[in-house]
Image: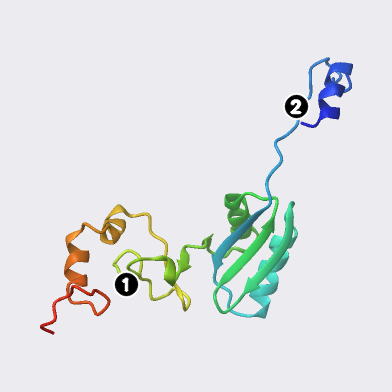
Amino acid sequence: MGALDHLSNFCGGSRGVSGHHNHHKKRKQLQTVEIKVKIDCEGCERKVRRALEGMKGVESVDVQRKQSKVTVVGYVEPAKVVSHLVHRTGKQAELWPYIPYGEVAHPYAAGTYDRKAPAGYVRHSEDPRVSQLASAGSAEVRYTTAFSDDNPTACVVM
């Protein structure tokens, strides 16, 4: 609350009909929500765009048909955007499950590699077994780096 709002509370400016204080709703923050939704044609793209542009709080909608990705910027909640899109279009939608290829230590590990992912992306995984593969002390990493060209102390037999 600003100083003027605080002062108006003392003066009685924010009292309702019943004499109780009106509480301000917490403002939503500007967010970027990325959604994966299958978009086959221009008609599907238009349907998705119109459904999201009509939603309260949405500032902009960017549809990337080849990646099956929709980016929504606005004062919205991610879960509500996905449920609104599913309800209005009847299409399956989920929050964008992929991260750029370079941000993963082992992009071809069982939990991260997804052949349906767009080029340059792998599936984001919170699975502890996948993150264990990235830990320096794990046996898998020691065995895979033992014969690596990037490792200066690697075995030179090969």
Q: Residues within 10 Å of mark 1 (few under 14, many from 20)?
A: few
Residue 155 place in picture, x, y as percent? 13, 77
Residue at 27% in and 76% down: 150
Q: Nearer the viewer, residue 158 or 66?
A: 158
Residue type at numbered disc 1: Tyr
The location of residue 121, given as percent across then percent down, is 45, 72
Q: Report the coloring of the rendering.
A: rainbow
- How many discs appear? 2
- The image quarter in which residue 90 lies: bottom right
Q: Which mark is residue 108?
A: 1
Residue 98, relative to residue 29: is it above or below? Answer: below
Q: Is residue 70 left or right of residue 24?
A: left
Residue 14 visible in the picture: no
Which is more N-terminal, label 2 or label 1?
Answer: 2
Q: Quadrant of residue 39?
A: bottom right
Q: CA distance from mark 1 to mark 2?
A: 51 Å
The answer to which of 20 and 87 lies nearer the viewer is 20
Horizontal side of residue 140 vs 21, given as left or right: left
| Residue depicted at x 39% and y 66% | 104
Q: Please tell me whether residue 65 is drawn above or below residue 104 in the rendered image.
A: below
Seen from this angle, which residue lies furthest left?
157
Question: Does any portion of residue 54 appear in the rendered image?
Answer: yes
Local secondary structure at mark 1: loop
- The quadrant the N terminus occupies is top right
Q: Is residue 137 above or below residue 67?
A: above
Tell me where residue 36 sits by quadrant. Answer: bottom right
Q: Position of residue 149 (x, y in %)?
A: 24, 80
Q: Quadrant of the C terminus?
A: bottom left
Q: Amino acid at mark 2?
A: His
- Residue picked out by circle 2: 23
Q: Residue 115, percent across and down?
A: 38, 76
